[in-house]
Every structure is written in structure tokens, then in C-alpha cells.
Image (tube, helix red, strand yellow):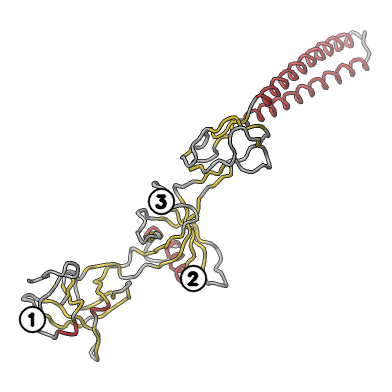
């Protein structure tokens, strides 16, 4: 005869949903200028930080363009200075009535054109410097970089495909769909209409190998529409992922439990018998005798029942061999795991 000690557990079963892991941020690294790849500055699969150098495109052509643009700025500024001096002299002569108004207008126009040329040359210089900066391709986010799709020496450029892809792995987002009934419960707690706040929801994951993921999640977003086809609504939750166990695209089981629900004794369903008088269990007494105990069950929890009346935590009940015992009978209890003598023996 197998016995087990009654333990407390949350009086409601967690809601279970299928979910999928998504990256919060994922970026395809693109070359913004055309050129030959000079250097690859990372290891494939390595962690990178925002601002880290990933690739370098041969800068020679862009450096030459910058030098040419700098020369054009210097030339335009020299022309502007000459036009400014000419305008100053013409204005002085016009004040002495020794230069015509037409001459003054021409000098002013020449200066304005020279000033515009300077601005145009400066803009060209800024563009050349920007293109030069594009020869160093840096990471825009923190994350893990995948394999490089180009090797050193290849021609790269806009429209030639991404150089690599960076995915943020910590934290990650898990997307799943919940029923409209669960949605109502969560919304009530978000709005203060329930008895607890949203943080009371325990959000955990079950991995494909049957183990529970070690980090708890937090609800980040609940969609604003219920699907007419499925009667569910999309939910996003955030999970810390310091060891990168969760990978984008991975399928997981999401467990959602309201921790404010009180705890009750939980007994295996197989230990609960029923007759005309109601449900009952056999309780192990001191001296290794058993007695029939009427109970009131509540919610089904996995393969067990919560007990709202009739049992206390710490009591020992019979879970196997029920068909061979009766009220008041002496028994030889056994531990359910080891099979050795259990309580009271």
C-alpha cells in the first residue's frame, strides 16, 4: 500500500498556451556604399555591442573624394574672398559717385554667387566625409551576429544583399495567444478591477525537452482585437535570456498562473473515492491504521484535486492499494518513491 503526505499548492491550475520566441531587435547589416570588402572584424556567432566595427570597405576612393571636396571648398572660399573685396571696393566708389549702381549690383551678385558656391562645396565635402564614414560598417545594436555572407575581397554595396544579421538575444520576446476568458482576467487586473495587480501573474516557459526555463517573464503587450476565427488574442511577454537558451523561432509552452490565488491541499485523483455519501480518502493514522475521511474537492490541478474541506497539509493519505483496505484497518504503508516503509513504521 502506497501513501503520500498531503502538500499545499496554488488552488488553480496555470493556463497553458503555445508560444514562439522572437527577437526584440534584429538588423540586417547593409553596405551603404559600393566597394571591395577590406576587413571583417568579428567572429561569426560572437556577441557584439552597438558601435562595434564589423566590416571595413576599402576607403581609398572615398578618401580621395574627401580630399577633392576639401580642395573645392578652399577654391570656393578663395573666390568668395575675392568677390567680397571687389564688392567692398565697388561700394566705396559708389559712395563717392565714381562707380555706377550697375557696377555695384554686379559686384553684389558676384559675391552672392561665390557664397553659394562655398555652401555647395561644403555640402559636397560633408557628403564625401559621410561616404568615407560608410567604409566602416558598425553594429547599430547589441546582439549576436550570425555568419558573414561576404568574404574579404568581395564587391559589396547597396542592393547586393546583407553583409550579416545581428539578433538581440537578451532579453527576448515570447508571442502567444490567450483565450478571451483569460484576457478578461488580465484586463481586470491591469485596470485595477481585480484583486491583484498584473505583476501577480507568474509567467513561465516549458522548453521542448520538458524542462522549465529558469527565468520568469513579464507581460509586455496585449493586442487590441480578439480573432473572430480562433477567439484568442495575441500577447507578447519579455523574458531575460542571459545564457541564450531561448533562440528566435523556438517553440515553447507558456504557463500563466495568478499567484494571488490561495493555496489548498492537493491530492492525486487516484486517491479520491466516491460513493453515495460523497468523495472521500483514506487517511493514515498513528499506529498504521487507516480511516475514511470525507472531503470536498475544488479545482482539478493537473492529475490531482484541490481539497477545500476535510484535509490539512502534512496529513498522510493512501494513494495506491485502495481496493484492499477498509475503514479502521491496519496497514503496512510504503513510500511512493523508494518503496520502503513510510510514515508510522
Q: Mark 2 = which residue?
A: 180
Q: Residue at x 47, y 61 (%)?
A: 19
Work out whether residue 42 or residue 151 is closer to the camera in this orientation and state it: 151
Discs 2/1, front = 1
Discs 2/3, front = 3
Q: Is residue 294 above or below residue 302?
A: below
Quadrant of the rendered image containing residue 152: top right
| In-image side of 338 versus 64 (left or right) | left
The local crowd at label 3, few if under 14, some if 14 to 19, many if 20 or more residues have their Cα within 10 Å, is few
Q: Mark 1 = which residue?
A: 330
Q: Residue at x 55, y 63 (%)?
A: 224
Task: Give the distance between the C-alpha atoms of the residues marked 2 and 3, in whole angstroms.
Answer: 30 Å
Q: Secondary structure at mark 2?
A: helix
Residue 203 appears anywhere in the view: no
Q: Is residue 245 above or below residue 343?
A: above
Which of the marked residues, 3 or 1, is nearer the chain's N terminus? 3
The local crowd at label 2, few if under 14, some if 14 to 19, many if 20 or more residues have their Cα within 10 Å, is some
Where the C terminus falls, by quadrant? bottom left
The local crowd at label 1, few if under 14, some if 14 to 19, many if 20 or more residues have their Cα within 10 Å, is some
Q: Are marks 3 and 1 in contact (CB under 8 Å)?
A: no
Q: Mark 3 = which residue?
A: 245
Q: Position of residue 139 (x, y in %)?
A: 54, 37
| In-image side of 178 versus 57 (left or right) | left
Q: Position of residue 113 (x, y in %)?
A: 83, 22
Q: Is residue 151 above or below residue 201?
A: above
Task: Give the distance between the C-alpha atoms of the residues marked 2 and 1, in whole angstroms.
Answer: 51 Å
Residue 181 appears anywhere in the view: yes
Q: Residue at x 90, y 18 (%)?
A: 106
Task: Give the distance between the C-alpha atoms of the residues marked 3 and 1, in whole angstroms.
Answer: 52 Å
Which of the marked residues, 2 or 1, is nearer the chain's N terminus? 2
Q: Secondary structure at mark 3?
A: loop
Work out whether residue 99 or residue 321 is closer to the camera in this orientation and state it: 321
Amino acid at each position: 500500500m502506497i501513501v503520500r503526505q498531503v502538500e499545499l499548492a496554488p488552488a488553480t491550475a496555470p493556463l497553458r498556451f503555445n508560444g514562439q520566441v522572437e527577437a526584440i531587435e534584429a538588423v540586417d547589416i547593409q553596405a551603404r556604399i559600393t566597394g571591395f570588402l577590406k576587413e571583417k572584424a568579428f567572429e561569426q556567432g560572437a556577441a557584439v555591442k552597438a558601435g562595434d566595427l564589423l566590416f571595413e570597405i576599402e576607403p581609398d576612393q572615398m578618401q580621395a573624394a574627401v580630399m577633392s571636396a576639401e580642395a573645392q571648398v578652399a577654391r570656393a572660399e578663395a573666390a568668395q574672398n575675392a568677390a567680397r573685396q571687389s564688392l567692398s571696393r565697388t561700394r566705396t566708389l559708389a559712395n563717392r559717385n565714381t562707380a555706377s549702381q550697375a557696377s555695384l549690383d554686379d559686384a553684389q551678385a558676384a559675391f552672392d554667387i561665390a557664397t553659394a558656391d562655398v555652401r555647395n562645396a561644403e555640402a559636397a565635402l560633408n557628403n564625401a566625409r559621410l561616404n568615407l564614414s560608410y567604409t566602416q560598417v558598425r553594429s547599430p545594436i547589441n546582439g549576436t551576429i550570425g555568419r558573414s555572407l561576404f568574404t574579404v575581397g568581395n564587391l559589396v554595396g547597396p542592393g547586393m544583399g546583407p553583409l550579416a544579421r545581428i539578433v538581440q538575444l537578451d532579453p527576448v520576446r515570447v508571442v502567444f495567444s490567450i483565450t478571451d476568458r483569460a484576457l478578461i482576467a488580465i484586463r481586470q487586473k491591469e485596470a485595477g478591477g481585480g484583486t491583484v495587480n498584473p505583476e501577480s501573474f507568474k509567467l513561465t516557459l516549458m522548453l521542448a525537452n520538458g524542462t522549465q526555463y529558469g527565468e520568469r517573464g513579464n507581460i509586455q503587450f496585449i493586442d487590441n482585437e480578439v480573432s473572430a476565427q480562433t477567439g484568442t488574442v495575441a500577447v507578447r511577454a519579455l523574458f531575460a535570456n542571459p545564457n541564450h537558451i531561448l533562440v528566435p523561432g523556438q517553440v515553447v509552452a507558456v504557463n500563466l498562473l495568478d499567484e494571488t490565488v490561495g493555496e489548498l491541499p492537493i491530492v492525486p485523483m487516484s486517491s479520491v473515492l466516491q460513493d453515495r455519501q460523497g468523495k472521500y480518502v483514506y487517511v493514515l493514522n498513528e499506529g498504521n491504521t487507516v480511516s475514511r475521511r470525507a472531503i470536498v474537492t475544488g479545482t482539478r490541478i493537473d492529475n490531482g484535486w484541490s481539497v477545500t474541506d476535510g484535509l490539512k497539509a502534512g496529513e498522510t493519505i493512501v494513494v495506491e492499494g485502495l481496493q484492499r483496505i477498509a475503514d479502521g484497518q491496519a496497514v503496512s504503508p510504503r513510500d511512493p518513491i523508494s518503496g520502503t516503509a513510510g510514515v508510522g513504521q
